[in-house]
Amino acid sequence: MRKFDDVFKNKAFLWGSATAAYQCEGAWDEDGKGLGEWDYFNHHSPLNINQEDGDTASDFYHFYKKDIDMMAEGKQNTYRFSIAWSRIIPNGYGQVNQAGIEFYNQVIDYCLEKDIEPNITLFHYDLPLEIAKEGGWLNVKITDYFNEYAKICFENFGDRVKLWATINEPRYYAYCTNVVGNYPPNRKLDFQSYFQYQYNLMLASAKAIRSFREMKIDGIIGIVHDNGNVEVDPATKEPENIFEVADFFYNRLILCPTLLGQLPSELDKMIQVFGFTLLRVENEAELFSYGKGDYLGLNLYNRQYVTDWQKGSSQVFHNNKGTGSNNKEGIRVENIFESSFDEQVRRNKWGREVNPRVMYTALKEIQDRYENPMIMITENGHGCYEKPDASGHVEDDERIEVFQQFLSYMQDAIDEGVNVTGYYHWSTMDLYSWINGYKKRYGLVRVDFDNQLERIPKKSYFWYRDYIINHLSQGEEKLAKSN
């Protein structure tokens, strides 16, 4: 049986890439898979503004060997992917689908055959439809459903999988589903549900981590948080107050449970500030104490640049139309705080800051405020419109430029003692970018969605390969010296 000690036995650092089940697998109704909330949304909702879905996506379900081969050829030594809950348990609870278990067994085994360390996320946005019908993450019963699903995964895959994450981006998921309203169930500016989602998601994570420990699974487990590194505009009148409320809004309900094993000390104060009612379980302190993870997965793209509330009612600014919209990503929360917009920082075509410096500042903040935990950069990348040449090759120099800067800032943080042990580029290949559809591309490998899903490595794929080769050789030298 493999041991966690084997993960870093012959390597100093994990270099890989990442995907998510709904975004790349396809096979939406094959081999006993149940319906997911995104299946229903994309097939039936007028809010699917780009009229695209993940029915086929990149068809990783049938192309997984080819995709893993390309990772190996690109010298990647780890692969982060998620499991589709409804592929394992079609209704979310109850009967298990053995064909789903077998599919992930095949993926895991092939990764290991190619010397690629599998890193599994249990939940990445794709809720089983039957659970959604029961209220989804607003129904506290889901925390037990999730725990049972997690235990099935631990039982079936834990002998080989040594790196686990419970939930991907609980804060951002709660934000898109309840504040932006672009992810199902499409509530907008519903702050009550936004905070309740985070509480229930973290409660589910804590229960699963407790099961992981009780089952004595050999490995490490944590959660994946989207970077909410708060920076306050220098013109802000009450900078300390604005930092506190914004940091709570973006970070604290996730980072305190997963890194400290407790809810934020300022929770009761913030309930008054934001004016919401939190439905809490009686033994929450005990349950959350079990939820402290072994590491933090950090999905890092941008910061949260904020200032005092100026005027106007609550409003969210978001762009899922790319060049079809001029929206800059941000929010106004009436009477509390709002986003500030730094005109000196470039933005991508979807209105989000492109600011690689925040890789360093975010990592240093986690180190300084949360006892320097183990961190893996579980997502980091750059979304672009792309045009291939006649052979299908993409010269994605813009991605390489941003990529290199992010990695340079990560190395600066590591040099200053931040405990980063792995990096996963988003994404392994082009895939379905949620509500953005397929024009927004992140992949190291181009997928020709109009030509039998042909895979064609981009310039960035080769750049990353060479970067890894260089850093792996440096890491081997360090290992040799330490031994």
Image (cartoon, rainbow, N blue to C red):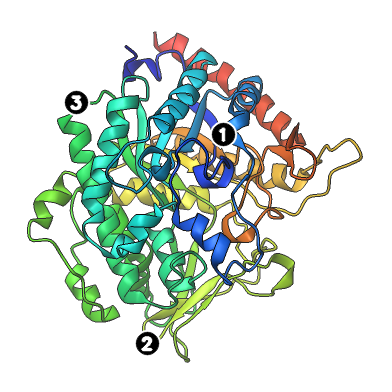
Q: Is residue 320 above or below residue 107?
A: below
Circle 2 residues within 10 Å: few <14, some 14–19, many ≥20: some
Q: Is residue 332 above or below residue 382?
A: below
Residue 406 vs residue 377: left or right?
right
Coordinates of residue 163 in the picture (x, y in percent): 37, 30
* Secondary structure beneath label 2: loop
**Which residue appears at 56% of the width and 60% of the height?**
42
Residue 78 in view in this figure: yes
Q: What amino acid does circle 2 point to?
A: Asn
Q: Nearer the viewer, residue 17 or 371?
A: 17
Coordinates of residue 394 in the picture (x, y in percent): 80, 41
Coordinates of residue 19 in the picture (x, y in percent): 54, 40
Which disc is residue 216 wearing? 3
Circle 1 residues within 10 Å: few <14, some 14–19, many ≥20: some
Task: Please identify, in this view, whether the residue under mark 1 or under mark 2 is nearer the observer.
Answer: 1
Residue for badge 2? 335
**Which residue appears at 68% of the width and 53% of the height?**
438
Coordinates of residue 267 in the picture (x, y in percent): 20, 68
Residue 253 vs residue 62: left or right?
left
